[in-house]
């Protein structure tokens, strides 16, 4: 039934958000209701429309004029999600404990509807394109743009928005970027002598969506500007508490640094450290864990040789024993590529079946990867960081050692994992949940086992290192991890506490 409803809408060019799906599912005859709603919406061919719960409510309780309003929205803005629809996408779950104002703003755990068909693949890229085009279309410099198919008619300045199909250099070392929109494709050239622009073009990756301003020369667009969806400078929100960020504890591995982790637990409970450190501990309200809580099993060949706990259930039991010692702090856990969640991103939260003891802990919240949460009003984007592998491999100047540079780039591209089909497995969902819809106060990642920090346009970019000492793999590649050095935001200022 789930797939039938979703496919009916997908066939009609309509993407459902959670709210819309829930409302439709609870109708007496959901399929008949879907048919009737699709008929009323009559989305023009080739257009994509995002149907929200609010719009379904309008339909359910509407007079003909309100329905007309819905139709008006479709024809006026076929490619844009309305402000209301964005608000409707936001899930708000309040917990009962009054001490914490914890809210899940976006969690993809229950939004995985893909059935792996080609049309899902098309819907996925359409969704990504439309969302990112929406951000670009709000920028004054590229607001007035034309479909790629109309570039040939333009003798003046060309302004286009497209998804990157390919990037390569010419024999002369100029940059060629192939881009497409829903009307056609075109080749964009960035001249090597345009140094600043060429440098920017070196950071373009496949499958991101960019704006281009330039001039037409035969069938080429010579770029004079390249524009990211980007983020504006962000005003800092005040914080009268401390949030602690960790990741990549890898419980179960023989290289898990249990003594250091025990010191950390003692500190967070206010039983370890000097006066200054204890003062920070006193104010800790939230602990965020950005993936790879346990080492997992079968993640890479011969992993069992490096495990002291070879059963995934027991690894989570051990993690629950350690974390269970933490009192009076809200703990938020997202999965990483070593956890028991599906590998493809967005990763749903760690399944309860694997981690029963952890689920029993009242102060633990499980979220997806990525997830967007609010911690007493501090908006925090949690992403494990698998896409860093792709950036380190393909983008000049990017490396695991400087993950803050990759995080900055992800914010500018408004997507946590834009490169499709490389090392980061991405699920072709009907909607692309990896788009960074809102600007966070904090962007927290892990995965590379190396601490990083940067304040970028008012956003704290934090990579929280690891509690695992250098592995055999890391020795081969000369990767030196940052072990047991825990980043915290104490009343809004960044500090690192060492537990080794
Ligand atoms: Fe990882």
Image (cartoon, rainbow, N blue to C red):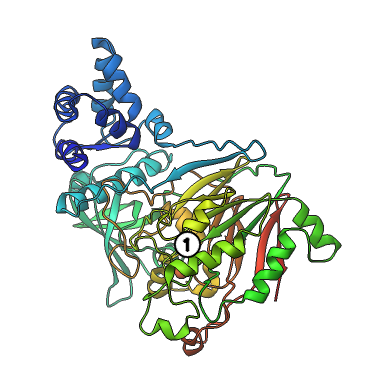
Q: Residues within 10 Å of mark 1 (few under 14, many from 20)?
A: many
Q: Looking at the image, which is closer to me, 272 or 424?
A: 272
**Which residue corresponds to the image point at 30% horizontal and 69% vertical from the top-left?**
422
Q: How many marks?
A: 1
Dot 1: element: loop
Residue 145 falls in which quadrant of the image? top left
Residue 423 falls in which quadrant of the image? bottom left
Q: Is residue 472 visible?
A: yes
Task: Answer left or right for 320 relative to 421.
Answer: right
Q: Looking at the image, which is closer to me, 7 or 397?
A: 7
Quarter of the picture containing the C terminus is bottom right
**On screen, 305 above or below 56?**
below
Task: Answer left or right for 268 relative to 134.
Answer: right
**On screen, 266 above or below 161?**
below
**Which residue corresponds to the image point at 68% horizontal and 53% vertical from the top-left?**
327
Circle 1 is placed at which residue position? Answer: 384
Q: Looking at the image, which is closer to me, 103 or 232?
A: 103
**Which residue corresponds to the image point at 28% horizontal and 13% vertical from the top-left?**
62
Task: Answer left or right for 456 relative to 182.
Answer: right
Q: Residue furthest right?
A: 275
Q: Residue furthest bottom?
A: 476
Q: Is residue 159 visible?
A: no
The image position of residue 385, as x and y in percent, is 46, 64
Residue 234 falls in which quadrant of the image? top right
**On screen, 164 above or below 74?**
below
Q: Is mark 1 within 8 Å of ligand 1?
A: yes
The image position of residue 47, as x and y in percent, is 20, 37
**Which residue corresponds to the image point at 26% horizontal and 51% vertical from the top-left?**
125
Quarter of the picture containing the N terminus is top left
The image position of residue 130, as x and y in percent, is 30, 43
Q: Looking at the image, which is closer to me, 174 or 298?
A: 298
The image position of residue 149, as x and y in percent, is 18, 46
């Amino acid at each position: 039934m789930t797939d039938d409803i979703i496919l009916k809408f997908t066939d009609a060019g309509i993407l459902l958000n959670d709210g819309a799906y829930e409302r439709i599912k609870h109708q007496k005859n959901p399929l008949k209701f879907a048919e009737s709603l699709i008929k009323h919406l009559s989305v023009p061919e080739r257009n994509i429309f995002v149907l929200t719960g609010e719009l379904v409510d309008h339909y359910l309780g509407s007079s003909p004029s309100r329905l007309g309003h819905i139709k008006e929205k479709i024809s006026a803005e076929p490619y844009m999600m309305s402000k209301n629809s964005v608000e409707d996408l936001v899930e708000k779950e309040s917990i009962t404990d009054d001490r914490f104002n914890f809210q899940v703003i976006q969690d993809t755990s229950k939004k995985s509807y893909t059935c792996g068909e080609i049309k899902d693949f098309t819907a996925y890229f359409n969704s990504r394109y439309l969302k990112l085009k929406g951000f670009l279309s709000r920028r004054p410099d590229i607001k007035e743009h034309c479909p790629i198919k109309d570039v040939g008619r333009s003798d003046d300045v060309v302004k286009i928005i497209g998804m990157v199909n390919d990037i390569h250099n010419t024999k002369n070392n100029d940059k060629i970027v192939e881009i497409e929109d829903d009307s056609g494709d075109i080749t964009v050239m960035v001249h090597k002598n345009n140094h600043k622009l060429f440098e920017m073009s070196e950071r373009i990756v496949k499958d991101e969506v960019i704006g281009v301003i330039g001039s037409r020369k035969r069938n080429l667009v010579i770029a004079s500007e390249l524009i990211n969806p980007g983020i504006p400078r962000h005003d800092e929100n005040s914080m009268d508490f401390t949030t602690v960020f960790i990741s990549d504890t890898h419980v179960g591995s023989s290289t898990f640094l249990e003594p250091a982790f025990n010191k950390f637990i003692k500190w967070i409970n206010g039983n370890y450290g000097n006066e200054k450190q204890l003062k920070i501990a006193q104010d800790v309200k939230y602990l965020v864990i950005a993936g790879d809580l346990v080492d997992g099993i079968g993640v890479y060949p011969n992993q069992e040789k490096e495990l002291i706990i070879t059963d995934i259930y027991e690894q989570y039991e051990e993690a629950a024993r350690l974390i269970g010692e933490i009192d009076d702090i809200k703990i938020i856990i997202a999965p990483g590529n070593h956890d028991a969640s599906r590998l493809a991103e967005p990763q749903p939260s760690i399944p309860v079946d694997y981690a029963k003891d952890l689920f029993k802990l009242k102060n633990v919240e499980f979220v997806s990867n990525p997830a967007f949460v609010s911690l007493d009003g501090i908006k925090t984007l949690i992403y494990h960081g698998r896409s860093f592998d792709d950036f380190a491999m393909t983008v000049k100047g990017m490396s695991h050692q400087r993950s803050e540079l990759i995080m900055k780039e992800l914010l500018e591209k408004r997507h946590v994992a834009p490169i499709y089909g490389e090392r980061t497995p991405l699920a072709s969902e009907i909607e692309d949940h990896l788009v960074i819809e809102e600007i966070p106060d904090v962007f927290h990642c892990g995965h590379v086992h190396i601490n990083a920090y940067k304040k970028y346009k008012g956003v704290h970019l934090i990579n929280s290192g690891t509690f695992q000492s250098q592995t055999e793999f890391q020795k081969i590649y000369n990767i030196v991890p940052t072990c047991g050095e825990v980043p915290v935001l104490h009343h809004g200022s960044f500090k690192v506490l060492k537990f080794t």
